[in-house]
Image: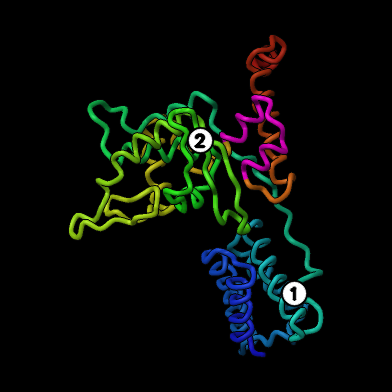
Amino acid sequence: MNWECAARAFCDHLRVERALAARTVEAYARDLEEFRRIFSESQGADPVPADVTTLDVRAHLAALYRGARAPTIARKLSSLRAFFRFLNLRGHMAGNPARSVRSPKRGQPLPRALDIDDAFRLVEVPGEAGGEPTALELRDRAIHEVLYGAGLRVSECCALDLDDIDRRDGRGGLVAVRGGKGGKDRIVPLGSKADEALSAYVAVRPELRDPKTGEQDPSALFLNYRGGRLTPRSIQRHIGRYAVRAGSPAATPHGLRHSFATHLLDGGVDLRAIQELLGHASLSSTQIYTKVSMERLMAVYDEAHPHARRRGDGD
């Protein structure tokens, strides 16, 4: 099997059998194409999967070191491991030449969580300029409340349908996250503030439709001004604009998710419960928030303790 056919079969496997998101499959395809291109430039021919050696994989990583960071290189190596493992299991090659190649060491940056006041300011920015809020401002306020109040990923927020929200008339509600990361579904509670914001937005949602045709996506919860489903890129752009107005220019949609988890942990919520709310497959992914909270605790200590202040002043 040549490289092109093997890569196509692998991507079909990811798309159909593992039901990975289209963007994830595209990322795997790009990594495989990059290996093919670099190998071809150095060897004068495309690689044959069955003939690829561990030295070839190491040479590829060495070429990547010229312009890529350690996390990116580690991800690309992971793509190659998964590709060769797939071919090995299907009987197209013996062994996995990428298996014994060590990933580059990489530090694990802590999530950037907003403090509670900054999170509140960012959530409440849409529509605060005065006057009657527009449909788009009410939509953005509802999005902020859902991201911070339910800890959704931005892609999960965009994928919500009207039927995924079970509102309780001002007493909060539930949101069904379907096909989250890894294809997993989960139910997340919504607070009363999110419920109120969603109620205000849903009331004006009919205003968001194509100005020429009058058409509107009948199922999507969050719509753009043309009546189509809102995209993650759009939400990122909108939050970036609101973050500047709120005085938190580094805030992002994922930052609101981090803030959701960190503030729950600070409030005494069990780590296992936070894992379920976030939709993490393993507890190790959630445990990073204990480090965030410890950092915040140390910052408060350094600010408040007399010896800490004196030490910080050079005494």
Provide the major secondary structure of the magenta segment.
helix
Q: Residue at x 70, y 70 (%)?
A: 82
Residue 128, x across and y down, in percent = 32, 27
Mark sitting on residue 93: none
Q: Residue at x 48, y 48 (%)?
A: 164
Residue 264 visible somewhere in the drawing: yes
* Marks 1, 2: nearer the viewer: 2
Up the image or down, 190 lies above or below 163; here it is above
Up the image or down, 26 lies above or below 8; here it is above
Q: Quick check: 189 left or right of 129?
A: right
Q: Quadrant of the N terminus?
A: bottom right
**Residue 150: within the magenta?**
no
What range of the chain is rendered magenta? 259-278
Q: Secondary structure at mark 2?
A: strand
Q: Residue at x 68, y 88 (%)?
A: 48
Residue 300, x across and y down, in percent = 64, 19
Residue 295, x across and y down, in percent = 67, 29
Q: Quadrant of residue 53?
A: bottom right
Name which residue type carries label 2.
Gly
Mark sitting on residue 173: 2
Residue ID for mark 1: 85
How are the colours assigned in the image? Answer: rainbow
Up the image or down, 283 lies above or below 245; here it is below
Q: Residue at x 27, y 32 (%)?
A: 133
> Which one is nearer the viewer's eye here, 141 or 309?
141
> Which one is nearer the viewer's eye here, 105 or 294?
294
Q: Quick check: 130 left or right of 229?
A: left
Q: Quadrant of residue 269?
A: top right
Q: Quadrant of residue 91?
A: bottom right
Name which residue type carries label 1.
Arg
